[in-house]
Amino acid sequence: MTDLQSVHTDNAPAAIGPYSQAIVSGGFVFCSGQIPFDPESMELVNGDVAVQTGQVLRNLKAVLEAAGSSMDRVVKTTVYLSDMSLFTPMNDVYAGHFGDHRPARATVAVKTLPKQVDVEIDCIARL
């Protein structure tokens, strides 16, 4: 059986339920979905989907770094949107955070997200 290591950093929002910010196993980091919480205040950031996406990706970056990985080691993301009409502004911010790196990705519209936010993103990365 592979060892599982829970990841926690104060530079990303604390888990608001019975889960870890991420789990390291088998040379990979499996990051839980992040929503646009400010990690210091644990309050949602105010703003449109572009502002929310920026905060979500900063949160994921902090978790990845705490695990010993980075955004350029991400192999897969899943983006959850409250409405597919928000795809373009989310995608513009997303592209800026990944630069030339292009991980595999699925983007889906869902009925609702936690705290009624517009975007949630999870990812899998190599160590």
Image (spheres, rainbow, N blue to C red):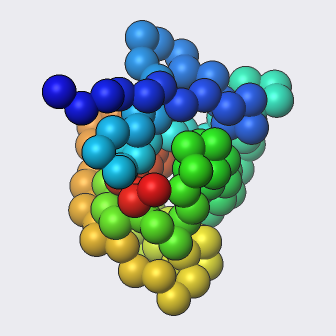
Q: Does residue 117 appear in the picture of this structure?
A: no
> Residue at left 65%, top 59%?
54
In the rendered image, which quarter contains the C terminus?
A: bottom left
Which of these two is toward me, 9 or 105? 9
> Residue 60, position in %: x, y?
56, 49
Q: Please, which residue is most extreme toward the top here?
A: 18
- The image shows residue 91, relative to residue 34, as above or below, that is below
> Residue at left 40%, top 57%?
125
Q: Please, which residue is most extreme toward the right here?
A: 40
Residue 25 vs residue 33: left or right? left
> Residue 21, position in %: x, y?
51, 31
Q: Please, which residue is most extreme toward the bottom here?
A: 100
- The image shows residue 41, relative to residue 118, as above or below, that is above
Which of these two is toward me, 54 or 103? 103
In the rendered image, which quarter contains the N terminus?
A: top left
> Residue at left 32%, top 62%?
76
> Residue 117, position in %: x, y?
51, 38
Which of these two is toward me, 26 or 85? 26
Q: Please, which residue is most extreme toward the left here?
A: 1
Q: Does residue 30 appear in the picture of this structure?
A: yes
- The image shows residue 1, relative to residue 102, as above or below, that is above
* Residue 71: quarter of image: bottom right
